Image (spheres, rainbow, N blue to C red):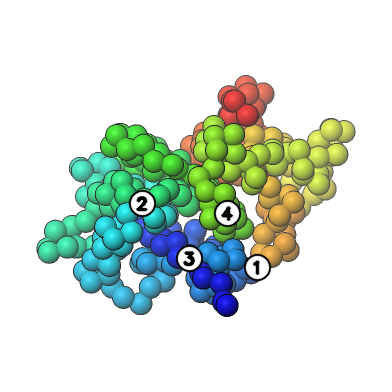
Amino acid sequence: MPQEVLECPAIWIAGASCSGCSVSLLNSVSPTIKNILIDPVIPGKHVNLRFHATIMAGQGEPVLRVMLETAEVKRGEYLLLVEGAIPTADDGLYCTIGELEGKHLTMKEAVLELAEGAMAVISVGTCASFGGIPSGSPNPSGAKSVREVLEEGGLSKPLINVPGCPPHPDWLVGTIAMLLIKGIPSPDELDAALRPKAFFGKLIHDNCPRRAYFDTGQFARHPGEPGCLYELGCKGPVTYADCPLRMWNNGVNWCIGAGSPCIGCVEPTFPDKLQPIFKKLDESALERFKISAR
């Protein structure tokens, strides 16, 4: 007898973002995006993506109704994935995801309404996780993270942050797989910023192939030179991610491997407190930006 495949409905909505998080997922190599959307992510469990404005064929009010019907019929069963920050100024009117009966549906309204009935919420990318670039000073749209919007709305829901600008596709696929296998992560499986420790549990600095240069005081003075990139503004000493081990583009390379300093894009303090990109962090910054309670 063929094994019954259980469905896990998912709704993906996007606010203040560049769609780079979606593009990163579409570029997943193993599993491919076809595997993710069509095949069981794990044996016996399949993700049914009901709404994703960037990649779906349907548009307009009919697909918004599908999204809302999913939230009603599958209450407590679906995953809500949020890409991008949520503008909150002027009651959220700086970002709408469509119209229903002639009325704008704002990103803020959609997040609160859909999160209320979701099994869990996943913030996809740094903008959704921490506000990211849209929330950078002076932030005229009042862009905020999913966590902030849920807390201000009085909603307590299981929330997992998968930051990155963009996040590695493995981080997102792995997080979804962990949810399907084990259920909601326990508090000790997430760090203080609600990131899965499986991917964000170690400093980039600790696994960097240029660490020996740092320990022996050999620092590059210009991009492209051998040596540690700390003097050129590398944020690896305050950034938690497994980029040095996982690498990008199907394991081909990563930022420091290409000669660029780490910019700390997975951190809650990105970008405002980790810039300028090519300016060295001072010693006080090293302590100030480290997340406590690890």
Q: Earlier in the sequence, mark 1 or mark 2?
A: 1
Residue 131 position by quadrant? top left
- Assign a secondary structure to mark 4: helix
Q: Quadrant of the C terminus?
A: top right
Measured in 3D between alpha carbons, the distance from the residue under mark 4 to the one under mark 1, in whole angstroms, is 18 Å
Give the vertical position of 21 relative to 229 (above or below). below
Disc 1 to disc 2, C-alpha distance: 29 Å
Quick one: label 4 or label 1, which is nearer the N terminus?
A: 1
Q: Nearer the observer, disc 3 or disc 1?
A: 3
Query: What amino acid is at disc 3?
Result: Leu
Whole-angstrom CA distance, mark 2 to mark 4, is 17 Å
Q: Residue at x 76, y 38 (%)?
A: 206
Amino acid found under the numbered disc labelled 1 = Ser
Residue 31 spot, x, y in % from top left: 62, 68
Mark 3 vs 2, N-terminal side: 3
Q: Residue type at mark 4: give it.
A: Ile
The residue that label 2 is drawn on is 76
**Residue matched to label 4:** 181
Front one among 184 and 254: 184
Farthest residue toward the front?
1
Residue located beneath label 3 in the image: 6
Q: Which residue is depicted at the point 41% across and 62% down?
A: 9
Q: Which residue corresponds to the image point at 58% horizontal and 29% vertical from the top-left?
A: 291
* Of residues 291 and 173, the one drawn nearer to the viewer in this rendering: 173
Question: At numbered mark 2, what does the secondary structure look like: helix, strand or loop?
Answer: loop
The residue depicted at 73 percent of the width and 63 percent of the height is 252
Query: Of label 4 and label 3, which has the lower sequence position?
Result: 3
What's the distance in space between the residues labelled 3 and 2, CA to CA?
A: 15 Å
Residue topped by disc 1:
30
Q: Which structural element holds mark 3?
A: strand
